[in-house]
Image (cartoon, helix red, strand yellow):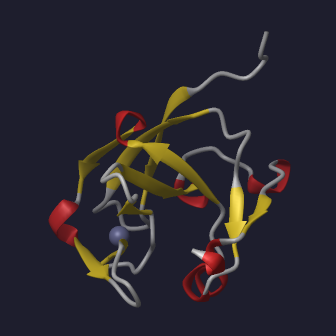
Amino acid sequence: MSTTQATWRHGSCHCGAVEFEVRDDLTKTATGNCSICKRAGWVLVFAKADNFRLLKGEHAQTDYQFGKKNAHHRFCSTCGVRAYGEGKGKDGTVTYVVNVRCVDGVDVSKLTPHAYNCEAM
Ligand SMILES: [Zn+2]
């Protein structure tokens, strides 16, 4: 039996224009090595559409895309914080990428993120 539970967790950007909830147990966090992940420096979790809800701020963000433009690298247009982004897989399934640093009450120094090879994607 697992001792951790995938519970809904609230998060936001810095100014509060963007708020979201993610359902995750935070046992599979990661840091990426692609050109944008290493610059942004975030600790991330992947969430299927069922496990992510945007509470507010859809239009408060700037959508940045580059390269193959498969992914939406969103950031708050007011405070500049990247709370989440999303992309579509080859099968059309949307996966959200959530910045754990934006989730309330998370001490990232207690997490053990693995190295995610997004540069190869
Ligand atoms: Zn903001």
Q: Indicate the position of residue 43 as horizontal and vertical percent values.
A: 66, 62
**Residue 104 x, y percent position in the rendering:** 55, 46
Looking at the rendered image, the quarter that the C terminus falls into is bottom right
- Residue at the spot x=75%, y=55% of the render? 108
Is residue 34 shown above or below 94?
below
Residue 78 located left or right of residue 116: left
What count of labels does the image hold?
0
Residue located 34% across and 49% down the image: 93
Residue nearest the observer in this picture, 95 or 39: 95
**In this rendering, would 56 be left or right of 2?**
left
The answer to whether any part of residue 104 appears in the image is: yes
Q: Residue at x 35, y 52 (%)?
A: 91
Residue nearer the viewer, 65 or 20: 65
| Residue 72 location, quadrant | bottom left
Instruction: Give x and y (percent) for residue 76.
Output: 33, 74
- The residue sitting at the left extreme is 59
Residue 77 in sight here:
no
Q: Could you say where residue 66 lies in the image, as x and y percent from the top left?
A: 38, 89
In the image, residue 59 sits, relative to residue 23, either above or below, namely below
- Residue at x 46% of width, y 49% of height: 11
